[in-house]
Amino acid sequence: MVFHEQPSLPWTRGDFKLLEAYEIKQKETCGHCGNPVWLCHSDNANLLWEVKTQVCYADKAVKEWSEKNPKSKDSPYAVPYVLTYDEGRPVQDYENLPSRKDFFEEQAHG
């Protein structure tokens, strides 16, 4: 089933290969940490792990809002915007967000 809908055309050899690749990826991915099982389940004493952290600013914004509004019955969610200025006044721009390309270029340049 693809996107909650049964395909109407017969599956091709390529369709079956994609499904097989997906099944292999699922079987070879650790259900606990998401790393490849051949690495995270290895007993190799020379294979070590470094812990890194990453900030999800959407999650951080929701947590901060929830702490400031502990009695709220609403279900908060984060919506991205870029802060710009118009004649010195801050403006929340919900339309001109950074692109996927912008993100990866930023990551590449540290």
Image (spheres, grey):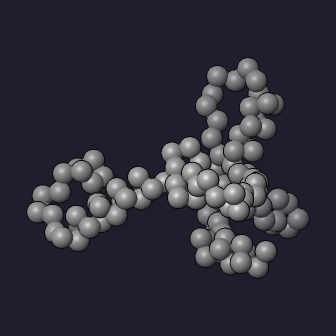
Direction from residue 18 to residue 104 in the image, left or right = right
Residue 4 drawn above or below residue 68:
below
The image quadrant that residue 92 belongs to is bottom right
Which residue occupies the foreground of this view, 31 or 102?
31
Residue 14 placed where, x, y %?
23, 71
Residue 34 placed where, x, y %?
55, 52
Direction from residue 101 to residue 81 in the image, left or right = right
Which residue is depicted at the point 56% across and 43% down?
32
Direction from residue 11 to residue 46 in the image, left or right = right
Residue 100 drawn above or below residue 79:
below
Direction from residue 28 to residue 106 in the image, left or right = right
Which residue is depicted at the point 70% across and 23% down?
72
Q: Is residue 34 visible?
A: no
Residue 81 placed where, x, y %?
69, 58
Residue 2 drawn above or below residue 75:
below
Which residue is depicted at the point 58% across and 59% down?
39
Residue 8 placed where, x, y %?
12, 58
Q: Is residue 31 visible?
A: yes
Residue 20 drawn above or below residue 60:
below
* Count of labels in the image: 0
Which residue occupies the foreground of this view, 18 or 36?
36
Quarter of the picture containing the C terminus is bottom right
Q: Which residue lies furthest to the right in this view?
A: 88
Which residue is depicted at the point 22% across and 64% down?
16
Which residue occupies the foreground of this view, 76 or 6?
6
Which residue occupies the foreground of this view, 59 or 40?
40
